[in-house]
Image (cartoon, coloured by chain):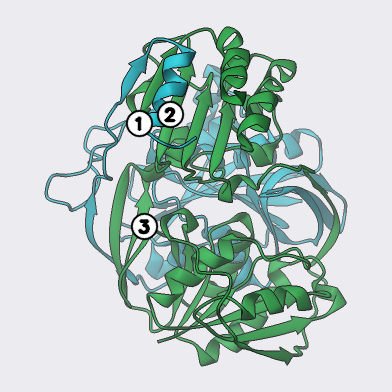
Chain colours: A green, B cyan
Amino acid sequence: MRTLVLAEHNASELNANTLNTVTCATALGLVDVLVVGHDCVAVAKECAAIEGVGNVLCIEDAKHAHPLAETLAPILCALGDNYEALLAPASTFGKNIMPRVAALLDVQQISDVCEVIDENTFKRPIYAGNAIATVRSCDAKKVITVRTTAFDAALPTGGSAAIQSLSFETGTDLSTFVSSQLTQSDRPELTSSSVIVSGGRGLGSIESFALLEQLADTLDAAIGASRAAVDAGFAPNDYQIGQTGKVVAPDLYIAVGISGAIQHLAGMKDSRIIVAINNDPDAPIFKVADYGLVADLFEVLPELAQALEQ
Amino acid sequence: MKILVAVKRVVDFNVKIRVQADGSGVNTDGVKMSMNPFDEIAVEEAVRLKEAGIASEVIAISIGEGKAQDTIRTALALGADRGIHIQTDDVIEPLLAAKTLKEIVDREQPDLVMLGKQAIDDDANQTPQMLAALLGWGQGTFASSLEISSTHVTVVREIDGGLETLSLKLPCVISTDLRLNEPRYASLPNIMKAKKKPIETFSLDDLGVAASQRLQVITVEEPPHRQAGQIVASVSELVEKLKTQAKVI
């Protein structure tokens, strides 16, 4: 089976979730990677170095400076003729584009694949991960988004794929990029960080939420949040972890003042070690935590940061 | 402006679902069902646009068994003007839902279609994008704010890195995210009024849509369970355990 992975990137760097997507694709067959963007040669080179990648297809054009589903979908459909499976990470990037591709190809997409059984059969979470469905696709071509936390990252070095530049006439007035406000942070990226400190409603205010900073600094951790904390305005939307936010699986997840609604657990329960700090001993988060500390978070947070610094 | 809102009947978000022992699926017998929460946000937004004088009519549509009418009634009680029910007992995958909705869009010619970004049962997150593709329209997915002019919609989207603003030509499809609005509760008088609002019913045959299931569900199982761990007494014990037992720091 020949597969094509759509790379997610910001023109200068490849998003690490593409490496996990390549691993999923490798379970299906040969892997090519498609890079669409503006001034993105560096990304194409990064993709060519990924172990297991056969060819890198690169489409560069100023109009691809910001990925729009309306312009990318026709490209994937046209290139799709040469492939039996098209894959992208199940990030907001992949989720936006791939269903549009699938519908144009008359394919029922398989979302959030977390395991490949064979080339037609896949496992995927449903009901916020409270059930796992095994589904068999009868479409000749597969369109897949990948739950990237369920697959190891492909090695970023060792490959020597050929880079092929393509041009593709595509243009649409259906949608136009206006602006973006991306969260600026020197911290590790949330979905690929090995340590995450995450805050919930229990923090009580935007000022208190900032208490997580010291702990995160000490651990070189990313900062996440529950939906309640984001809705309350303590943290920006891109911090949200859960069924409808980001899905993470770090080595260490420290949940502070998070009660543990099933929608939140859906986004973090595959973490290797979970620590919960909450003053409510009955909080559901303790049912999934490896280590629970029933305490006032305002007392223990500074103490914990200090203890870890030593 | 005419707005079409699609609503899905799903297991209520507060229900802790149970997987059937024989692996055939999730138990929905006697389980509380509600409108998909993301669709509620879509209905609320459409109704607000009507209240603001931007929309002239809001139509709520649902696909599914007879009880999907309850979900349509809920949308009518929230302020939608009339309903369309596509009655079917077939399994409706996102592609089939999008094809069905397209037939209604072709008949009704709305200027805007709004749907929740995902249904909380299958968590597919596909139908809005697929509908936009089939219609050849622009798509504004994961919307957290909308601004509508006579020819375009400016949509702010919640993306992994933050927020992105797009301008979409009308007509277009919008998929709604959590922070677009906070849906109202239906008042008793409005629930009573909703009973008198019209609901038109079609079958898939009426629309010329052929039911087809592309994804065969082989089995549904429980995910691996995490064991609850230990409660530690102090910060120092926690740090000690993380270092020596879990070895993560």
Q: In this view, does A7 lie above or below A31?
A: above
Which of discs 3 and 1 lies nearer the camera? The answer is 1
SS category of the residue bearing label 3: strand
Which of discs 2 and 3 lies nearer the camera? The answer is 2
The one of A119 and B198 positioned closer to us in this rendering: A119
Check whether the beta carbons of the residues at disc 2 and disc 1 lie within 8 A of each other. Answer: yes
The residue under the point 41% across, 56% down is A150
Residue that numbered label 1 is attached to: B245
Please rate how many residues cluster around mark 1, counting C-alpha atoms within 10 Å: few if below 14, some from 14 to 19, many from 20.
few
The residue under the point 33% across, 25% down is A287
Q: Are marks 2 and 3 on the same chain?
A: no
Asked if one can make out residue B223 in the rendered structure from this viewpoint, the answer is yes
A91 relative position to B121: left or right: right
The residue under the point 73% across, 67% down is A68
Residue that numbered label 3 is attached to: A124
Check whether the beta carbons of the residues at disc 3 and disc 1 lie within 8 A of each other. Answer: no
- State the CA–CA distance, disc 2 to disc 1: 6 Å
Q: Residue B242 carries which label?
A: 2
Q: In this view, does B56 lie above or below B104?
A: above
The residue under the point 71% across, 51% down is B2
